[in-house]
Image (tube, helix red, strand yellow):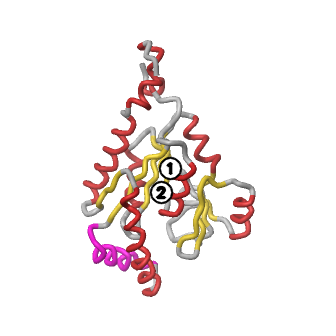
Amino acid sequence: MSNESKRPARGCLFIVSAPSGAGKTTLCRRLIDISPNLRHSVSFTTRPMRAGEREGVDYFFVDAEKFSRMIAAGAFAEWAEVHGNRYGTAINTLEQWLESGYDVLLDIDIQGAGQLRANLAAGEGVFVFILPPDLAELRRRLEGRGTDAPEVIERRIANAQGEIQASSGYDYVVVNDDFETALNELKSIIIAERCRATRVLPALADSFSIHV
C-alpha cells in the first residue's frame, strides 16, 4: 500500500509561535523542506515586503483596505495586529490542505494562536512554541539581522518577555539553541502526532475491521 493511500482522511494542523528573532521562520521553512506531507499555510499581511521575500511564498502582501475587507467578509481563521502590521490566515487555505489529508504548518504569533485555540474543535490543532536560549541571545539575533532600528529592537525585546509567558499554554516547547537539534525536535513532534491512534486508526478501520 502506498503512503498516499495511508494518508488520514483529514490532515493535522500544527501551530508554531515564537518571539521575533527566535528563529521560528527558518526552522519552519527547513521543516517544510524535509517533510513531504507537510504544507505551509501562507498568511496575508499588511507588512511591507522585505528583501528576498516573494509574493505567495513568504506572505500574500495586501494593503490595509483589502485586509479590512477580508475581515468583514469572515475570510480569516485568525488574524492579529503585531508590531503595527496585520497578519491573517485564510480559512480556505487551511481547509483545502486539511481536507485533502495533508498536514498544515502555521507560523503565527500568540494572538492568532489564541484565536485558533478558542475556535478549533477539541484536539484539532497541535501548538508548538519556539524559545531562544535566553533574552541576551534573542537581542543578539535581532541586532544581527540588520533590518530593524534600535527602537524597534527594544520594542521587540519588551514584547518578547510577555510573549514568552504564553508558552506555558502550548503543547510543546522547543528551545532553539542549536539549530539542528531544534529542527530534529520539531520533526519528532510531527512524527509523533502523525502516529496518534486517533489519527491513524480511522484511516485503517476498513482494512482491520476496527471500530473507531
SS class, disc 2: strand
Measuring from the top left, give residue 22's x and y in whole percent.
36, 66
Q: Residues within 10 Å of mark 2 (few under 14, many from 20)?
A: many
Instruction: Tell me the kind of residue under disc 2.
Output: Asp
Q: Amino acid at mark 1?
A: His
Of marks 1 and 2, the one in the foreground: 2
Question: Residue 157 placed where, x, y %?
Answer: 39, 78
- Say if 77 sits above or below 201 in the image: below
Looking at the image, residue 174 sits to the left or right of residue 28; the answer is: left
Distance (Cα) linking label 1 and label 2: 8 Å
SS category of the residue bearing label 1 = strand
Which numbered marker is on residue 107? 2
| 97 or 79: nearer the viewer | 79
Q: Is residue 139 magenta?
A: yes
Q: Is residue 142 above or below residue 42?
A: below
Q: Nearer the viewer, residue 172 or 84?
A: 172
Residue 40: mark in rendering: 1
Query: Label 1: how many residues lie within 10 Å, few (<14), some (14-19) or many (20+)?
Result: many
Q: Is residue 83 left or right of residue 35?
A: right
Residue at the image position 41 percent from the left and 64 percent from the top: 166
Left or right: 211 in relation to 55: left
Q: What main secondary structure does the magenta stretch of the protein show?
A: helix
Specify the segment rendered in magenta. Answer: 133-147
Residue, x 41% and y 72% (percent of image)? 162
- Image-quadrant location for residue 181: bottom left
**Is residue 81 a member of the stretch shown in magenta?**
no
Q: Earlier in the sequence, mark 1 or mark 2?
A: 1
